[in-house]
Image: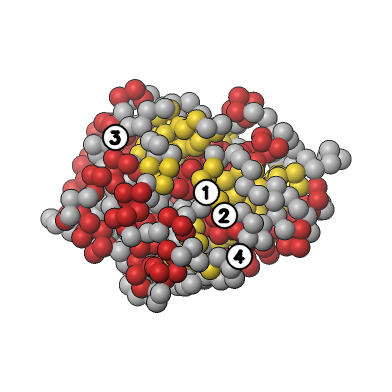
Amino acid sequence: GDMMGGYVLAIDQGTTSSRAIVFDSQMKVVGTGQKEFSQIYPRPGWVEHDPEEIWDSVVETIRTAIANAKIKPSDIAAIGITNQRETVVVWERDSGAPIQNAIVWQDRRTASYCDKLKRQELERRFTRKTGLLLDPYFSGTKLSWMLANVKGARARAAKGELCFGTIDTFLIWRLTGGKSFVTDATNASRTLMFNIATNEWDAELLDILRVPSAMLPEVKDCAADFGVTDAGIFGAAVPILGVAGDQQAAVIGQACFEPGMLKSTYGTGCFALLNTGTDMVRSKNRLLTTIAYRLEGETTYALEGSIFIAGAAVQWLRDGLKIVQNAAETGPLARAADSEQEVYLVPAFTGLGAPHWDPDARGAIFGMTRNTGPAEFARAALEAVCYQTRDLLDAMHKDWKNGGDDTVLRVDGGMVASDWTMQRLADLLDAPVDRPTILETTALGAAWLAGSRAGVFPDKKGFSAAWARDRRFEPEMDEKTRNTKLRGWRNAVRRTLSDS
């Protein structure tokens, strides 16, 4: 048996589902629970979640995971939380009730507000302090929209009656019965309101966004005392000791602790983060500068490139075009595509992310002929993810010279199970791609933060040593083919951009 209390529970609250995972003291997964929840689309480009539905799904999956692990709630030593970033919840301090649905990171409703702030020449000020761009993606403009559009909200917020939080903050508030109003540095760094150099909420930016500071949570390190769960919720009072936004949790779960290490997560979107150590790199290529993690008061920075559509392109093949019945079919289908046809899908369904940041671009397909069919579409969807990763990598190398060009990419997320896609990724990047044995890297990162602080998991060094590779994909494509394909991709993107 395990030592008493040797288990760690990770809550992974994602964009389309909530998951709970129990790890034993050897960091092995022993029980899981997962539940999908509703995506609400009130208007084109708007995306919302019901915070109550998210909360219910989290509680249910925790109970399922504990039952599946065949342990008692009191066997859990600590909880780590990782979450979809940038999604905004505002709730009443006394009742805990949300004032409206959460506005999700993908939501574009604040595009015109962002444009207005840009016209006032404020973007440089935000970028200098937060490392972010003025894009609807981040929390700040979403929060400002909510305060302006929910009757009486701004006045109530100023009086301290309302709480703002990203999903981690909302869950901790609920899990602790309203006792803890906190977030971590990684989630804070995505709000457009947090100064990542000084590690404080920024009064000037709050003023521009018209956000009362009274509604903001306290910001802690990623491994810290975030509060203790109310025993009534799932049967035990357990300390919450680790929190990080999903992409940062994956950096940690991939043990990318050294400057120059790069991880890319292929989920709904794709997110590549390059650890730049204590260097707060100012991107000249519209990448984001963000906090990778903050441990024991020391901040480690990253360059981040985000692509809005990765796995979502495969879901579109499945649900929109009905070309496949499940995502796993796309690899074999792509392998069967006609190599003579160069078909490009630019999946700008909700605009283009880094390094373009064009919210008005829309998806397009180029190079179709009369014999283009499902196989070519599948290949184009999977290759789009690889091409976009290449664009991010190129931008990172331009921005940060210390990193060298011999980067190895550590990958995770649902899409990396496809050998075809990973081989094509290595081919188009002209760099090795390492897939770990544990694909639950986001949850593992959150678990490690909590478990290492609780003393049941190894320290940073021990954890790095335990990271294990399942397979390395080496590039095999000849340079001429690669260059031809990359040229075709760049041409397709150029023709998709909204101002072309």
Q: Nearer the viewer, residue 243 or 331?
A: 243
Cβ atoms under marks 1 and 2 closer than 8 Å: yes
Q: Residue 218, which numbered label?
A: 1
Q: Is residue 121 visible?
A: yes
Identity, as a three-letter code, of the amino acid under mark 2: Phe
Secondary structure of residue under mark 4: helix
- Left/right placement of residue 83 relative to residue 153 reads right
Label 2 vs label 4: CA separation? 16 Å
Across and down, in percent, residue 472 comes to 50, 32
Residue depth check, mark 3 versus mark 2: number of the one nearer the observer: 2
Which is more toward the observer, 491 or 114? Answer: 114
Give the vertical position of 205 relative to 481 (above or below).
Answer: below
Q: Nearer the viewer, mark 4 or mark 1?
A: 1
**Which residue is painted at 45% across and 48% down in the image?**
188
Check whether the beta carbons of the residues at disc 4 and disc 3 lie within 8 A of each other.
no
Tell me which corner region of the image, top left, top right, bottom left or bottom right, holds residue 381. Answer: bottom left
- For label 3, the SS is loop
Q: Looking at the image, do the residues carrying marks 3 and 2 touch, with CB atoms under 8 Å apart?
A: no
In this rendered view, identify the residue nearer to me: 499 or 338.
499
Camera-side mark, 3 or 1:
1
Residue under label 3, please give it. 282
Splitting the image into 4 quarters, where does residue 305 fall? top left
Name the residue that disc number 2 marks: 181
* Mark 4 lies on residue: 55
Task: Tell me the distance, in whole angstroms, between the alpha carbons under discs 1 and 2.
Answer: 7 Å
